[in-house]
Image (cartoon, grey):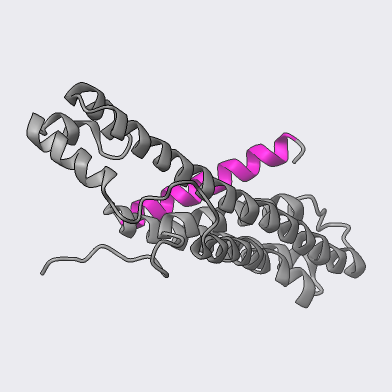
Amino acid sequence: MKRKPPRKVIRGVLSPFERASEVLFGLIMALTITGALSVAHATAHETRALFVSTLACNVAWGMVDAVMYVLNAVFERGRRALLARALREHADQVGASELLTEVLPEPFVGALRGTEVESLRQRIIGHPDLPARPGVHGDDLLGALGVFLLVVASTFPVALPFLVIDDATAAMAISRALSLALLFFSGVAVGRFAGLRPVSVGLAMLGIGVVLVGAVSALGG
């Protein structure tokens, strides 16, 4: 039975890799903040304040990441418009082939014959949906909202135990366990999306997250 590639949640918005990346970023931000708590001397007030500060930090990070998502979408759309104009001006096979390597893997372009390159060039420059100039689309804003919600949502598995559990040591243990599980399952989703071994990618994502958190904490992040 043939496996169908996983679709995006909404056409054109947030692939599984993008979703897993945002979860990873949000987890790293939250883990570096909670890691600064000394559970041996933490008071109930300090653990509650930790939840608020972690949530506020990830809300701010989510806003920044959402804006960058929209800007990146606009910049990529502008690059594609520039590429289309360049294809109109390069009717020769060599020039068109070099430009097409930006949208197709180079081995694919190299396998095309001269007539096929020209046919593909004509189809691209004649596409009715080709934008004359870049702009912000509704999917960009929807994707930005998704980015924001993912970054903020990834705060809760890390920080919520400090709000509902009085014992700081137990809260830290539960927080770490939930964070590691979320890292693993994010990697599994990416592995399935990329056609790789899901468990192996999950373990790799888990290891990367641990190393990055350790590095950020060591550098004073």
Query: Which corner quadrant of the image does residue 176 belong to?
Result: bottom right
Vertical comparison of 7 with 183: above or below:
below
Residue 201 falls within the magenta-colored stretch: yes
Give the side of residue 109 with respect to residue 101, left or right.
left
Q: Quadrant of the C terminus?
A: top right
Query: Which corner quadrant of the image does residue 145 belong to?
Result: bottom right
Residue 156 falls within the magenta-colored stretch: no
Who is closer to the viewer here, 208 or 191? 191
Who is closer to the viewer here, 119 or 168? 119
Give the side of residue 147 with respect to residue 91, left or right.
right
Q: Position of residue 31 (x, y in %)?
A: 68, 54
Vertical comparison of 81 with 111: above or below:
below
Q: Residue at x 62, y 56 (%)?
A: 66
Q: Residue at x 85, y 69 (%)?
A: 48
Q: Is residue 141 visible?
A: yes
Who is closer to the viewer here, 211 or 171? 211
Which span is picked out in magenta?
Answer: 198-219
Q: Magenta residues: mostly which secondary structure?
A: helix
Vertical comparison of 170 with 209: above or below:
below
Who is closer to the viewer here, 220 or 137? 137
Q: Residue at x 21, y 38 (%)?
A: 121
Q: Position of residue 40 (x, y in %)?
A: 83, 57
Q: Quadrant of the N terminus?
A: bottom left
Q: Is residue 113 visible?
A: no
Give the side of residue 93 with respect to residue 202, left or right.
left
Q: Position of residue 202 (x, y in %)?
A: 41, 55
Query: Which corner quadrant of the image does residue 12 belong to?
Result: bottom left
Q: Position of residue 128 (x, y in %)?
A: 31, 55
